[in-house]
Image (cartoon, helix red, strand yellow):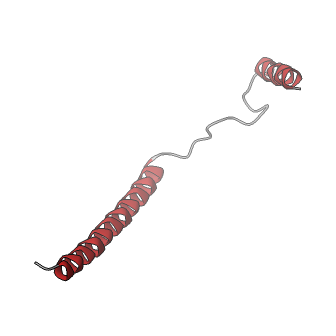
């Protein structure tokens, strides 16, 4: 096998390898996107955190406010 034939073969293998990796990543992206859509549809839409004043106790709001105020004073 001559050097020219070896270089041609290496170019072909490089191109084939790049296409294989590209299509694998493309396929994986499609699968992850579809899985995300299926999971989002199967889960009910719930409010993760209630709005302020809705179901949060005033004591909790006061504690959070005090913690934030203390943090801001310490950080300057």
Q: Residue furthest front?
A: 3
Q: Which one is nearer the viewer's eye here, 9 or 46?
A: 9
Q: Taking 19 as reference, is 56 left or right?
A: right
Q: Taking 1 as reference, is 28 left or right?
A: right
Whole-percent x and y of residue 38? 41, 55
**Residue 17 sits in quarter:** bottom left
Q: Taking 66 as reference, is 47 left or right?
A: left
Whole-percent x and y of residue 68? 82, 25
Q: Which one is nearer the viewer's eye here, 24 or 58?
A: 24
Whole-percent x and y of residue 48? 61, 38
Q: Residue furthest left?
A: 1
Marker count (numbered)? 0
**Residue 66 sits in quarter:** top right
Q: Quadrant of the C terminus?
A: top right
Residue beneath the point at 31% across and 72% down = 19
Q: Quadrant of the N terminus?
A: bottom left
Residue beneath the point at 76% across and 20% down = 60
Q: Which one is nearer the viewer's eye here, 26 or 12?
A: 12
Whole-percent x and y of residue 7? 23, 77
In the rendered image, the vertical position of residue 37 relative to residue 70, given as above or below: below
In the rendered image, the vertical position of residue 39 relative to residue 60, given as above or below: below
């Amino acid at each position: 096998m001559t050097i020219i034939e070896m270089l041609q073969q290496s170019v072909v293998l490089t191109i084939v390898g790049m296409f294989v990796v590209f299509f694998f990543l493309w396929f994986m992206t499609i699968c992850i996107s579809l899985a995300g859509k299926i999971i989002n549809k199967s889960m009910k839409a719930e409010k993760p955190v209630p709005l302020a004043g809705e179901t949060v106790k005033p004591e909790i709001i006061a504690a959070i406010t005090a913690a934030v105020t203390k943090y801001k004073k310490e950080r300057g």
